[in-house]
Amino acid sequence: MKYLNDGNNLLQTETRLCHVGRNPDKHAGMVNVPIYRGSTILSETLEEWQSRKGCPVASYGRFGSPLSRALEAAVCELEGGYRSILFPSGLSACTHSLLGMLKAGDHLLISDSVYQPMRIFADQVLTRLHIEVQYFNPTQGSALSAKIKENTRAVYLESPGSLTFEVQDVRTLGAIAHQSDALVIMDNTWATPLYFKPFEHGVDISIHAATKYIVGHSDALLGIATANKAAWPALQSSAHHFGEIAGPDDIYLALRGLRTLAVRMKQHWDNGLKLAQSLQTHPAVDKVLYPALPNDSGHELWKRDFLGASGLFGVVLKPMSWPQLSVFFNSLRLFGIGASWGGYDSLVLLVDPPSERTEAPRAFEGPLIRIHAGMEDANDLIADMHYALQAAGEVEGGRVVCREEGATTG
Ligand SMILES: *Cc1c(COP(=O)(O)O)cnc(C)c1O
């Protein structure tokens, strides 16, 4: 079989998704790169062993296998970076990207709408290592410039932000960071490698929780980080020195998931948009937080920078009592209640309002929920959601305001 040579990037994304990272010639003609299990990699001769020692990847299983190389090459090509490396979870990719860059005395700036486990890691682990952590308002470039210091080593972005979905002007924020020689690290999970091209916007390290859309079936945890040439050595050594290695079964599932990413994303985007539009005008809904909606505050930036939208968005409900909220959730038949997202299944989750934010606080009168539009039929999803909202509206007992703390402790 001919090796796919797409050095000129002439092929469309859908075509590349079906071919990147494959080489059946090397795997007995198998369409998919098989699962490699191995710690020891044998050499035939002492001379071969000696020659491999300079190349860790070829000398020991902890540095990867032909299967991990295949997924890394595929994601790297889609992202447009220099090299990629796998981690056993999305969070691990985030934390090690930072640990590879930072040392005691460095200053780190993080977007205030960042994925909450990252915030906990920064506040509890990085500060213990004497790394100074500060947050900035994700929607204001000027807020970032004002906070940059001589020792600012990295700026950490996530667009749109977790839970509240603020779109960031990555290009502008990146330019500000680079003026001061700070690296730009971005969590690109929401958009997938298909809908936002981080390296065209000045990002130095891009991260995906492959657990979400790349795996796509809610059955594996995996992270992947991609660097440009300058940031690659630090990223790679951070993975190697910490002994991070993803399991072969999970890598296989992610590479398999990647093949269908384009068709799945079209359905998630379409369903997300239809569902969000139908909720926007619902009397029980206060606000829908989804940059793909034309009246969302991030819509113009999203249109400028993104090539599509995922099926994940936020909804602020009008204040309702706990019994009403309970009836709403428990009346849903097609939406599972659970963490994570990116699988074929639809999900809904009551999320804590972002009360820990210091720079761009967001307070809501009613409960905040996060919806993941799966791959079901859009009208079925809309009908299910509206049925549950109506059931909640019919609950007797007054309209007790579900205040922020009520959402977590109730
Ligand atoms: C889920 C998620 C992660 C972490 O991924 P895990 O595989 O669950 O560790 C990181 N960033 C974002 C934006 C996520 O949604």
Image: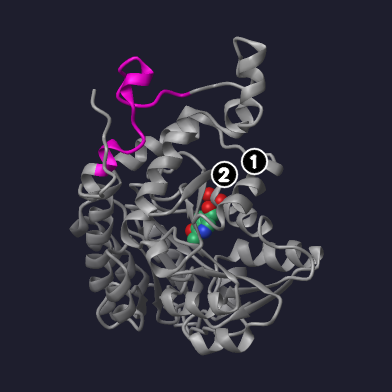
Determine crowd level at label 1: few under 14, some 14-19, many 20+ residues with C-alpha closer than 10 A. many
Q: Which residue is rendered at x = 53% and y = 44% of the image?
A: 85
Whether disc 2's CB lies below 8 Å from ligand 1 is answered no
Q: Quadrant of residue 246?
A: top right
Mark number, residue 80:
none
Looking at the rendered image, the quarter that the N terminus falls into is top left
Residue 136 % position (x, y) = 58, 81
Q: Mark 2 points at which residue?
A: 87
Q: What residue type is labelled 1?
A: Glu
Residue at 46% from the left image edge and 24% from the top image edge: 35
The answer to whether residue 258 shows anywhere in this view is yes
Amino acid type at circle 2 is: Phe
- State whether residue 394 is above or below residue 272: below
315 vs 59, nearest the viewer? 59
Left or right, 139 with reference to 24: right
Quadrant where the image shows the C terminus:
bottom right
Q: How far apart are marks 1 and 2 (CA)?
A: 6 Å
Measuring from the top left, give residue 73's x and y in whole percent. Answer: 42, 41
- Across and down, in percent, residue 381 comes to 26, 58
| Magenta part of the chain | 16-35
Q: Which residue bears the numbered disc 1?
A: 244
The quadrant in which residue 278 appears is bottom left
User: Residue 23: within the magenta?
Assistant: yes
Say if disc 1 is inside 8 Å of ligand 1.
no
